[in-house]
Amino acid sequence: MKHFSALALATAVALVGNLGIARGDCSFDEISLQTAPGFTITIDKEYKVLEDTIAKVKYGLYCDSQPKGVDGVDKWFKVPVSSVGVRVPIASGFLEALGQRDALTAADSPGNLTNICLDASKIKSLDTDEQANVDVVFSSDAASDGDKSVRLPTDDSLSPLQKAEWIKFVAAFFNDEKSSDSLFSSIADAYNCHWSNLQNLAQQPHAYWVQYSDNGKPSYNIIDSSYQKSLLAGAGATNDTSKALDDSSDLSKFQNAIKDADFVIDQTNLTEYGKRVTEWYGKFGYSDPKNSGVGFLLSRNIWRTDKYTSKSGVSNFPEFGYVRPDLVLQDIISVLEPTYDSGHTRRWMLWLGGTNEDTVAIDADNYDCKSPWISSVTKCTARSDFTGGDTDTSESSEKADDSDKDNGGSGSSGRTGKIVGGVIGAFVVVVLGIVGLHYFNRHRRNARIQALRQSDFGGEGINLHDARRFS
């Protein structure tokens, strides 16, 4: 009897211990947040509260019956939810990573979802009538769908890891915080490991993230939001973001600000598929890029993040890329420092400067629905010996991305061109110096011979044979 009582007590402790609070068949797991992502999770005996500290909205989540007399909660949801609507792509990515793709039953634009594992026939358009058939709608606006809408961040004011940690926020609606915590920890470990490995470069690449827009007035922008800045810094790159222009309509100042770039990453809305690099040149005012004298234009190192797309051409990056910042960072590293991991396969980085501009449609060849890479993290090995590539990296770059094989080596670092150019220049200077010195000595010798012939050394001139001894 004592043994049975002890066993029952141990079971109760396990259920309501420091990892979670259990009520019936529903448990609330306590987890920590690593990055100050812009939300908090507070667990009470009968409910938990998710506070979006950015939008200043509190969501109450409960298992059995809605608690009474709780102040400050703006919306209540019974969890775990079973049916979800999405108005932002990142929500679909979080659901896929959590193994909850089947819960996605409605979307703002179902045709724009790029996850090939979704059953498109079961996803309805998220119109007014469909709102009644879902438990929650993840949106960019906490008020978009009344009491059912929950905001997720869509801008780039958060760092890559801060944005990715919102997977825990979404997981809370499924009472699956522990799984999300484990997955995010692996993602963060890999991201931070690759970041650290790229901080000992002998020569840091110079890169900018840019965007053109036209809302009645052309605007040329150097993007210095936390998301982009963190990724470039993590890849070992430098840039002078103080050059971000106060007057973004000044094309000349913009071109002058980025002329020292080795690489440019663009997020302009380009629509002329197959001719997008020409479209890019036109929007940014480069009428003769081949003769511009600008490094990144000569090496054609203009990149984008929309290589992986749906069959209809919708970029997968907002759906999966934001969920996996470690893979995005590896993509960027593979462009800036191809020798770091020549075996890495780029998913989102597209070489716009190439001659084909090929995107890759997500399909069974690159995404396995039974073993999805979005929820599988490869461990990174810490290393302090990587100082960057110091030779032509075009071959490594092409191996990393077969679609770039017709690029004529344009995927190689602009710094490589500078180094090779410097070596060639130095060689030319040395050769010219030797030739010049030869002709200078010859001239000096002939002049001295002539002078000696005309001079009087003891009343006798010096003959040509003797004169050569003075040359």
Image (cartoon, grey):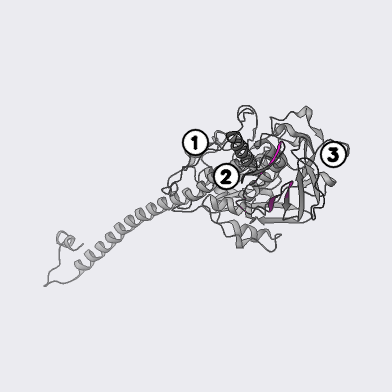
Please say whether residue 26 is one of the residues in the magenta stretch: yes
Q: Earlier in the sequence, mark 3 or mark 2?
A: 3
Report x, y in % for residue 436. Answer: 33, 58
Identify the image quadrant of residue 96: top right
Callout 3 amino acid: Gln
Alpha carbon separation for disc pair 3 and 1? 45 Å
Report x, y in % for residue 75. Answer: 81, 48
Q: What segment is highlighted magenta in the picture?
A: 24-49
Disc number for residue 185: 2
Disc number for residue 387: none
Q: Say what secondary structure mark 1 lies in.
A: loop
Residue matched to label 3 = 131
Q: Say what secondary structure mark 2 lies in.
A: helix
Please say whether residue 432 is one of the residues in the magenta stretch: no
Callout 1 amino acid: Gly
Mark 2 neighbour density, 10 Å: few (under 14) some (14–19) many (20 or more): some
* Residue 387 visible in the picture: yes
Mark 3 neighbour density, 10 Å: few (under 14) some (14–19) many (20 or more): many
Q: Earlier in the sequence, mark 3 or mark 1?
A: 3
Left or right: 275 as drawn, with respect to 142: left
